Image: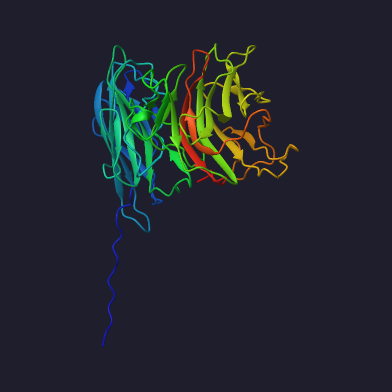
């Protein structure tokens, strides 16, 4: 019997993305950034058209108008053979535009189609988009459709306009398999088509039924580590019009939490008008508790305070918050037995509490002290069976709401 071995031949290294930014004639020499690689081999570079650009080491010198293929060549090492990657350098008489950050928020496999937000640019050229991996996401116009889990590079290309050349920028888009547990009571990710009404998507219009319906808006809101972040779209609650309810099975004992993301727009007339609350399951009932308000600060109109009321007595947050910033809000309704003394020393009075978190806060566990704790002994308690979104009048706030979860437990983080 004899044994033999067969040599394993090394293969080329898998090189990452290699790109060379567009330039205009007269640009200063610049250094190339090599693609990522698991190989330790040194890189060298060539230009296919030396009348457009020449290369010395890793430094490119622009010499003419046109395009050239820049090839990055990585030498072999002990594990890999030599490998190459190419990129097109375009040199024009036009100035390349300056882009701001291009960002595509992560999604889960159940996410509906969503629209891309183009990067800011000093050019007015129109944008088009491509996806490098269509098993993860496809693009039609500016609308991304999630296909499967994985990552893809979304490239935004701006057309030439005026004195500006065409140029591109890219962002990584990640799609994860959904692992988000359902809320034990109710949830709303507002994942219907943008422009459709909540009343046509599982919510009940209980007041001002046909006036200014609350609509789905895109994109949704994001917030680090929150379960409801970046899923679906959002709801736009504006100054006046329709009120809607999301009903659920009555909660007769224990505690119920409503958590959601909120982003407010400055509204000078915004005074003491609530836009969110708990209610009884009967949509004809007008008793609401745990009312959330926003009041613009009279000294600094770029900021506001959250207001909170069990029913009649309003308390304001001790700090100011910024318009245009997304916050995580949790409203707690604790049911107190008729014979039990609550935390405020009153017998049989239910308690409501408000918690507000910014993106730097740790909300893994329920804080000992709420942002606002309140109890209105002048009003009867309710049996929570729905949450409401309310548009009362021109004094009401303009807010975007997303990632609503109603649960018996403090379970907020992914």
Position of the N terminus, as image quadrant, is: bottom left
Residue 27, horizontal then vertical, whole percent: 37, 20
Choose between 280 and 189: the one closer to the eye. 280
Residue at 62 percent of width and 27 percent of height: 309
In this picture the colour scheme is rainbow
Q: Relative to the observer, which residue lies in front, 346 or 259?
A: 346
Q: Quadrant of residue 54?
A: top left
Looking at this rendering, what residue extends furthest in the right direction? Answer: 345
Residue 51 can be seen in this image: no
71 to 181, vertically: above or below: above
Q: Which image quarter: residue 312?
A: top right
- Asked whether residue 173 appears in the rendered view, the answer is yes
Q: Position of residue 322 (x, y in %)?
A: 57, 22
The front one of 162 and 219 is 219
The spot of residue 161 in percent (x, y) is 28, 15
- What residue is shown at x 31% (from left), y 54% (from top)? 81
What residue is shown at x 55% (from left), y 15% (from top)? 270
Q: How many marks can you see?
A: 0
Above or below, comparing residue 339 to residue 7 in the picture: above
**Left/right of residue 8 with respect to residue 212 in the rendered view:** left
Location of residue 281 in the rendering, given as x and y in whole percent from the top left corner: 48, 36
Q: Judge from the rendering whether residue 231 lies leftward or rightward of residue 338; answer left or right.
A: left
Residue most extreme to the bottom: 1
């Amino acid at each position: 019997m004899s044994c033999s071995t067969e040599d394993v031949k090394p293969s080329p290294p898998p090189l990452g993305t290699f790109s060379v930014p567009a330039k205009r004639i007269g640009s200063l020499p610049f250094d190339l950034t090599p693609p990522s690689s698991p190989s330790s081999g040194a890189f060298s570079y060539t230009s296919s058209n030396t009348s457009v650009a020449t290369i010395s080491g890793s430094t490119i010198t622009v010499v003419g108008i046109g395009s050239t293929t820049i090839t990055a060549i990585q030498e072999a090492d002990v594990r890999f053979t030599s490998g190459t990657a190419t990129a097109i350098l375009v040199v024009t008489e036009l100035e390349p535009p300056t882009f701001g950050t291009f960002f595509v928020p992560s999604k889960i496999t159940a996410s509906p189609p969503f629209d891309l937000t183009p990067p800011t640019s000093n050019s007015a050229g129109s944008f088009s988009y491509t996806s490098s991996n269509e098993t993860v996401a496809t693009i039609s116009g500016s609308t991304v459709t999630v296909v499967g889990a994985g990552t893809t590079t979304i490239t935004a290309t701006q057309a030439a306009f005026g004195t500006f050349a065409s140029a591109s920028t890219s962002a990584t888009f990640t799609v994860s398999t959904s692992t988000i547990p359902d809320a034990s009571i109710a949830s709303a990710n507002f994942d219907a088509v943008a422009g459709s009404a909540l009343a046509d998507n599982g919510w009940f219009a209980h007041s001002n039924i046909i006036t200014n319906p609350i609509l789905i808006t895109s994109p949704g809101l994001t917030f680090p580590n929150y379960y409801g972040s970046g899923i679906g779209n959002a709801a736009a609650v504006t100054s006046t019009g329709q009120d809607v309810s999301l009903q659920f099975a009555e909660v007769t004992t224990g505690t119920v939490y409503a958590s959601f993301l909120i982003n407010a727009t400055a509204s000078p007339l915004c005074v003491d008008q609530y836009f969110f609350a708990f209610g009884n399951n009967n949509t004809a009932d007008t008793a609401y508790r745990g009312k959330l308000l926003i009041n613009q600060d009279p000294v600094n109109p770029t900021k506001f305070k959250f207001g909170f009321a069990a029913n009649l007595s309003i308390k304001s947050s001790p700090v100011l918050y910024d318009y245009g910033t997304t916050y995580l809000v949790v409203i707690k309704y604790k049911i107190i037995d008729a014979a039990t003394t609550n935390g405020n020393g009153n017998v049989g009075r239910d308690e409501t509490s408000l918690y507000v978190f910014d993106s730097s806060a740790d909300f893994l566990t329920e804080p000992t002290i709420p942002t606002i704790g309140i109890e209105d002994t002048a009003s009867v308690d309710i049996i929570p069976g729905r949450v409401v979104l309310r548009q009362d009048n021109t004094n009401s706030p303009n807010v975007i709401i997303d990632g609503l979860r109603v649960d018996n437990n403090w379970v907020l983080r992914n």
